[in-house]
Structures are given as C-alpha cells and as structure tokens.
Image (cartoon, rainbow, N blue to C red):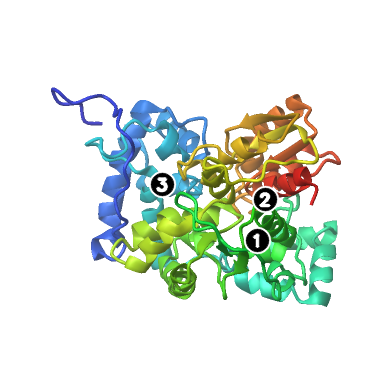
Amino acid sequence: MSAPVEGQREGSLEAPTRHPLNWRDPEFYNEDSLMQELERVYDICHGCRRCVSLCNSFPTLFDLVDESETMEVDGVAKSDFWKVVDHCYLCDLCYLTKCPYVPPHPWNVDFPHLMLRAKAVRYKKEGAKASHKLMSSTDTVGKLAGIPVVAQAVNAANRMKPVRKVLDKVMGVHPDAILPEYHSRTGRKRLKHHRSSGTPEAVGRTRGQVALFATCYGNYNEPHIVEDLTKVFEHNGIPVTLAEKERCCGMPKLELGDLEAVEQAKNHNIPVLVKAIDAGYDIVAPVPSCVLMFKQELPLMFPDDPDVQKVKEHIFDPFEYLMIRHKEGKMNTEFKEKLGKIAYHAACHLRVQNIGLKTREVLELVPDTEIDVIERCSGHDGTYAVKSEFHEISMKICRPVVSRVQKADADHYSSDCPMAGHQIENGLKDEKVPEHPLTLLRQAYGL
C-alpha cells in the first residue's frame, strides 16, 4: 500500500462520492488490468481491515494474506483473488459505512464496484452456471411458478425434504434455505382493476400520487405487501396506480455480472416509468434493492441517459415518501392500534440510499410503540443465502442479527427487505414470522 504523501490525510472526512461505472470501455474487461486493480485495493484493505465484521469477502481476503508465505497480498495467488469476489453480494455497506478511502480520497477505493467489474469480466469470459442464471431470472421463474396449479405444487415441493435434497444436488439450492412462496394471484392481478379516488396534493418533493413498481418479489412472492402499500398510501390521501408494465429491476443480473441483461431490463422499465412521471406521478417500490437499482446503480451505469436520471429523481422508498409529507403536516397520524415493541432490521440496500432511517421514524409516530433498530447485514442478498456453497456462511453473517432479535423479546420483528426477514426467521427457528413494516403500519391504522 502506498504511503500517504505529505499533506494527504490518512482517511477522508468528506462525504463519499460515486464515479460512473465505465462498463462500456473495453479496458473495463481487461483481465490483466483488473488483476492489477484488485491487488492494489486488496493491499489497501489488508492494511486497514475495518471491514472484517461485514460480509465474508474480507475475512476470506485476510485469511488468504495471513496464510501466504509473505503475509502480504503479493503472496496470494492471483487465482485466489476470485474467492474474495465470490463472497461479495454488492450490499455497499463497506463503501458507505466503513471505508475511509472512498472517493474523493485520492486512493479511490470503490470495493463494491470493483467486485462488480470482476463479476462482469468473469461473466463475459465464462458465463455462469445454468442454475445461477435461473435463480437470477426472477420474471421467468415467477411467471412459471405463479400458474395456479404450478404454484401449489412448487410451494408444497419446496417444503419436502426429499425434493430439497434433489434441488441441492441439481440446482445447488441448500436444503435448509427458506425458499419464497409463489402466488397465482399476484400483486399485479390484485391491483389490476384498482382505481384510487381523491385529488393529489403536492408536498415538498412529492407530487402526491404514485405509480407502484410492484417488483418481482412483491408481485410473485409476497403480494400482500403491494396491497399494504396501496392501503397505507390511500389512507394518507395519496392515489396509487400500477406501473403500466414491469420487468425485474435488474439487481439479480447485476449481482451475477450480466450487465447486458441489466441494460435490457433498463430498456424495458425506464420508458414505462418516465411515461408515468411525465403524467404527474412519482414512483415507489416496496423492496429496497429495486429502489436502489433505479436510484444508484442504473444512473451510474447510464450517466448520460436523461430518462434514467429522471427516474432517479422521482423514485422513492415508501417510508421516505411518507416522511417527506409528514414534515409538511400531510401524513395521517391517527392510529387505532399500538404496535408495542418492534425489533427492526434496517436493510443494507435501504441504508445505502443515504436517506436515514425513515421506516423507524414513521413507526415511532404510532403511540405506545418502541423500535429496537438493528443495523447489521442479514447475509441474504436474494440468492447468496440460497446457494448451497454459501448458505451456512450467510447464516453465520446473520447470527448477530438473530441474537439481537432474540434479546429484544419484541412483539414483532421486521425488515424492509422481505428476504432478510425470512433469513432472520430461518435463524430464529421458532413459530414467529417476520412482518413487513408496511404490514405493521397498516395494522396500526386499523385498515
């Protein structure tokens, strides 16, 4: 690691900035150049080690270094660099909460986007396992598994130990991982003929009416969240309509390194969302990863696309939207039910939106309600916790979260990320199930 030059701070005290992802440049896919940058950044990480408590990428790196002949990064085989990449699921927490060398620091460390570059280089060179491609094809799987008879069969099969053993061998799906249920009556079907009444009222950055991007998970796996959001927003005088159509936001393909597939999803979704924005709507989505995709990843991949930038400015986390309106006195705070104590897990992809803990702020408005905030990664990441090779590690990452939930002895436990909620459920192994914050807020309103 290069020594700091005179007048240069050891770490930066300035707000992190993000550089665009130059993924169209042929040099982006130059493996020799990639290896040089991996070695440079790994060396900085080795000399710092602040991130050791986050995902398994950093313990993997530090173990490789400590077990090498030189006990430095130059003693680690280049082929082993990929072991670090395999454990990064692009949660971004190292960038936002730990690393003192992110831009504008001159060392310019962006670990998540370096890992993304590595994943993209490997995908372009080797592709990916068929099972991993299928896991990341959420639209395809959701449509197939959502067929009425098929949905019942898939859900039943996913609970059968013999079937799970086969999935482990054939698909690399760990038999102990909680798999999402599928619904034939999807979120979009439930709201297909729904029409909100009322006149929108613009407040602050909000225009008072929203187009709902249901997300794959909200649409196929937990459609009640889509209904909960609609009920809560309408109770606050905010008309809701469905986005005309949608595909997966692209986050699963991003994590795979398939950037061309991300662009295809962008080309489908952005025109639809821009049409809604031009018609006077804001955009909301109930899953933080999808909001982050439109807020951060797509704008960094397509910095010169004005439509992508327009969506970035008009998409909101649901609780962010409500709190903007609450600050202007335009949120309904007449609650009929108390919620008691809530063990609330703040999802990584919500935290890195850098909007503060708006979910906590909204839920704290409910009388006789106490929020115990847990700011630690659950280790799920959509597919990481499901894969046979990573499941046990994911549960180890989640163990401190599970411990906090157990110690809280709360009336409810909740996460903005439904998958993180089920990861915690898997660690608890009791009869209590996670409840989404939108579900809890609807309950508080008595709706």
Reading the image, the residue beneath label 3 is 112
Q: Residues within 10 Å of mark 3 (few under 14, many from 20)?
A: some
The spot of residue 153 in percent (x, y) is 83, 70
Whether label 3 touches label 1, CB < 8 Å: no
Rounded to the nearest angstrom, the CA distance separating label 3 from label 2 is 23 Å
Where residue 246 sits, quadrant-wise, is bottom right
Front residue (pair 246, 208): 208
In the displayed structure, does residue 81 sit left or right of residue 168?
left
- Residue 12 as seen in the image, left or right of residue 96: left
Q: What is the total number of numbered labels drawn onto the structure image?
A: 3
Name the residue rendered at 70%, 71% in the picture: 194
Q: Could you tell me which secondary element the residue under label 1 belongs to?
A: helix
Task: Tell which tag, 3 or 1, sits nearer the viewer.
Answer: 1
Is there CB contact under 8 Å for labels 1 and 2? yes
Q: Which residue is mark 2?
A: 418
State whether residue 138 is above or below residue 342. below
Q: Is residue 193 visible?
A: yes
Res 259 → quadrant = bottom left
Q: Earlier in the sequence, mark 3 or mark 2?
A: 3
Residue shown at 38% from the left, 63% from the top: 310
Q: Amino acid at mark 2?
A: Pro
Apparent side of residue 35 relative to residue 251 in the rendered image (left or right): left
Decide which of 398, 347 is in the foreground and name it: 347
Residue 309 to residue 91: above or below: below
Residue 53 in percent (x, y) is at 52, 30
Residue 217 badge = 1
Q: Residues within 10 Å of mark 1 (few under 14, many from 20)?
A: many
Does label 3 or label 1 sit earlier along the sequence? 3
- Three-letter amino acid code at the position of disc 3: Pro
3D distance between C-alphas at marks 3 and 1: 24 Å
